[in-house]
Each structure stands twice: as structure tokens, then as C-alpha cells.
């Protein structure tokens, strides 16, 4: 029985040590992944690279074709600007500004011809993503899936 | 032990009463009692004492209800078996030990729930939106609570 109690105490100690010391490690890099998707009502097609989010998109949108036009990974420091060029003279600018709890605060800006047409501030769950849709492209729309992960 | 006579002690007489002597010794004491009034009195005294004790014991035994006694023994046995099983369960059961360890680890990690499993709620909380276009929708999917911002570029 003594061994059992010892095991419990050791496990509790290790857990507490691990989790109490964790916040002391500074995390300053934010891996931001931007997927540029062309959604349309053409022939049914789903890009292999969209496996993780396609069920979520299809639960909301009535498009039948989802093509991954670009998948750009940006390793950004806080307050560092990341730029992704989009079709149609557009650009997406993302800036991870800080953390609020376990969420990453992002400032997101969509520009067209160097003019801001849409901007938002979001608190993105770490290791999660948000999709911004609406810009017209060809016979469909652009969907921008932005995911963030603190390194 | 006080000596009733020169030949036998009170202990010898007591053993005679209790039939604890060998056959020869028993006959020797029985022969002696015929001639020794001191030892004879002692024998009578011992016999009367043991008769009183035996009577009381017999009465006490008669007062015992064998059915109730049996039930009591069975109950006592089952109680002991139950507590023994419980003790064995808590001390020998490896699964209980593992469950206890798991429970302790989980309880110690509860304050860090956010760090472990991430915050609950939508994938993104939209704090601010500004656009040249009038139509903006914020959608949260049912399954994964994935946040979608939709703006109509028309």
C-alpha cells in the first residue's frame, strides 16, 4: 500500500510541476496557415487538402466545388504583419497581436487594389481556424481559412 | 495447594473428581477415600461445587435458542466476509488503484483544463468588423463550432 501512495504522490507532483511551470515558457511565434479556397457550383470536387474543414464548409454553403488555390504558412511574431496575395488584385494581411487567455488575437485585413475592403479583429482558439468568405472570383467566391497555432 | 491428608493433595482429589487420573491412581485414591474422612469430605465438597456449576451451565444452555444462535453466527460470518471483501477490493484491486491514480491526475489537472483541452466555445470570437459592404454575417457551425465570417462583395 505504501508503494501505491508513493506512486500517487509522484504522479501528482509531476503533473503539478509540469503545469505550473508551463506558463513560464514564453511563446512568441504564431504559425499562421492561410488556405485560399475557390468555392463554386461547378462539377463536384473537393480538394484533398481541405479534408479537415470541408465538412464544416459543406454544412453551411451550397457550393459543390471546393478548390484549394493556395496554402501559405506564415511563421509570425506577435505584431508582425503577414501578407498573402489573393486572386483579383486582392491581398490578405494578418497580424497576431497578442494572446487573450488561450486565444490568439488576430487583426485581419482584406485589401483590393491596395484599399482596405474588410477588416476584423478576432480571438482565435489556439490550433483552430476561422473562415472568411465573400470576395467574388470567377463563377464563385473565395473562402479564406486562417488557422493559428502558438509555437 | 493445601494438603487434605498426608497421602494426597487437594489437586490429586480434584483430578480424581475430574477423572483425570490413570486407572491405577484412580483405584488407589478410591481405596484411600474409604479410610480417610478428610479426603472424603473434600470429594463431597468438590462434587457439590461441580454439580452447582453444571446445573447453571445446563440452564444457560437450555435458554439458548439454537435457531437464533445459528442465524447470529451466519450474520456474523457474512459481516466478516463482506468487510474482508471490501478490504481486499480496496487493497488488492489493480483497477481501483489505476482508477484512483487517474482520478487524482484528472483532479490535479482540472485547473489547467484550458491548457489541456483548449477553451470551449466557437473557434473564433469576432470582436470587431468593418467593411465597405453592408451585408456581413457571422456563422458558427453546429458540429465543430467553426466560425465563418461572410461578407457580400457586391
Image (cartoon, rainbow, N blue to C red):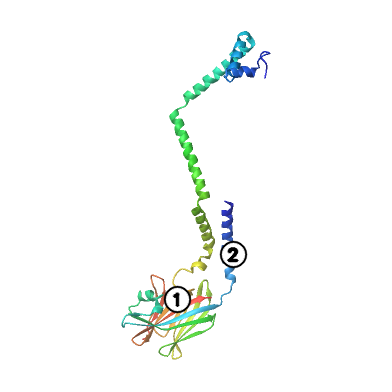
Give the residue displayed 58% in from the left and 57% down from the top: A9
Q: CA distance from mark 1 to mark 2?
A: 31 Å
Q: Quadrant of residue B42?
A: top right
- Where's residue B72, x and y in %? 47, 34
* Secondary element at tag 1: strand
The answer for which chain carries disc 1 is A
* Secondary element at tag 2: helix
Q: Which residue is mark 1?
A: A129
| Image height of A57 relative to B19, above or below | below
Label ID, residue A138: none
- Left or right, B24 with reference to B66: right
Tell me if label 1 and label 2 are in contact, CB under 8 Å: no
Judged by depth in the image, the label closer to the viewer, 1 or 2, is: 2
Give the residue displayed 45% in from the left and 28% down from the top: B66
Which quarter of the rendered picture does the N terminus of chain B lie within? Answer: top right
**Neighbourhood count class around disc 1 (C-alpha, 10 Å): few under 14, some 14–19, many 20 upward:** many
Front residue of B95/B10: it is B10
- Where's residue A16, x and y in %? 57, 63
Q: Which residue is mark 2?
A: A17
- Where's residue A83, x and y in %? 48, 86
Front residue of A81/B69: it is B69
Give the residue displayed 41% in from the left and 73% down from the top: B146
Which quarter of the rendered picture does the C terminus of chain B lie within? Answer: bottom left
First in sequence, mark 1 or 2: give its number. Answer: 2
| Image height of B73 relative to A75, above or below | above
| Residue at far front of view | B24
- Where's residue B145, x and y in %? 41, 71
Give the residue displayed 59% in from the left and 56% down from the top: A6
Amino acid at each position: 500500500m505504501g508503494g501505491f501512495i508513493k506512486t500517487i504522490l509522484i504522479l501528482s507532483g509531476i503533473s503539478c510541476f509540469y503545469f505550473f511551470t508551463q506558463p513560464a515558457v514564453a511563446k512568441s511565434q504564431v504559425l499562421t496557415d492561410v488556405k485560399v479556397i475557390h468555392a463554386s457550383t461547378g462539377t463536384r470536387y473537393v480538394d484533398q487538402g481541405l479534408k479537415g474543414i470541408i465538412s464544416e464548409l459543406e454544412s453551411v454553403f451550397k457550393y459543390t466545388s471546393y478548390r484549394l488555390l493556395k496554402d501559405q504558412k506564415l511563421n509570425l511574431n506577435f505584431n508582425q504583419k503577414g501578407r498573402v496575395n489573393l486572386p483579383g488584385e486582392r491581398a490578405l494581411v494578418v497580424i497576431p497581436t497578442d494572446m487573450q487567455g488561450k486565444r490568439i488575437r488576430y487583426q485581419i485585413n482584406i485589401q483590393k487594389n491596395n484599399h482596405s475592403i474588410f477588416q476584423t479583429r478576432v480571438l482565435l482558439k489556439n490550433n483552430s481556424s476561422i473562415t472568411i468568405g465573400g470576395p467574388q472570383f470567377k463563377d464563385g467566391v473565395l473562402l479564406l481559412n486562417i488557422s493559428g497555432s502558438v509555437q | 495447594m493445601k494438603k487434605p491428608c498426608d497421602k494426597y493433595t487437594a489437586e490429586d482429589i480434584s483430578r480424581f473428581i475430574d477423572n483425570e487420573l490413570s486407572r491405577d491412581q484412580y483405584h488407589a485414591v478410591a481405596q484411600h477415600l474409604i479410610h480417610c474422612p478428610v479426603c472424603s469430605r473434600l470429594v463431597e465438597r468438590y462434587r457439590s461445587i461441580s454439580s452447582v456449576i453444571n446445573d447453571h451451565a445446563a440452564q444457560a444452555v437450555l435458554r439458548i435458542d439454537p435457531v437464533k444462535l445459528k442465524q447470529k453466527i451466519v450474520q456474523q460470518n457474512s459481516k466478516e466476509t463482506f468487510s474482508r471483501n471490501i478490504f481486499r477490493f480496496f487493497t488488492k484491486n489493480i483497477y481501483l488503484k489505476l482508477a484512483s491514480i487517474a482520478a487524482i491526475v484528472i483532479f490535479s489537472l482540472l485547473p489547467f483544463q484550458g491548457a489541456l483541452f483548449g477553451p470551449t466555445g466557437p473557434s473564433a470570437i469576432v470582436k470587431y468588423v468593418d467593411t465597405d459592404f453592408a451585408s456581413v454575417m457571422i456563422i458558427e457551425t453546429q458540429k465543430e463550432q467553426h466560425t465563418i465570417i461572410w461578407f457580400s462583395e457586391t
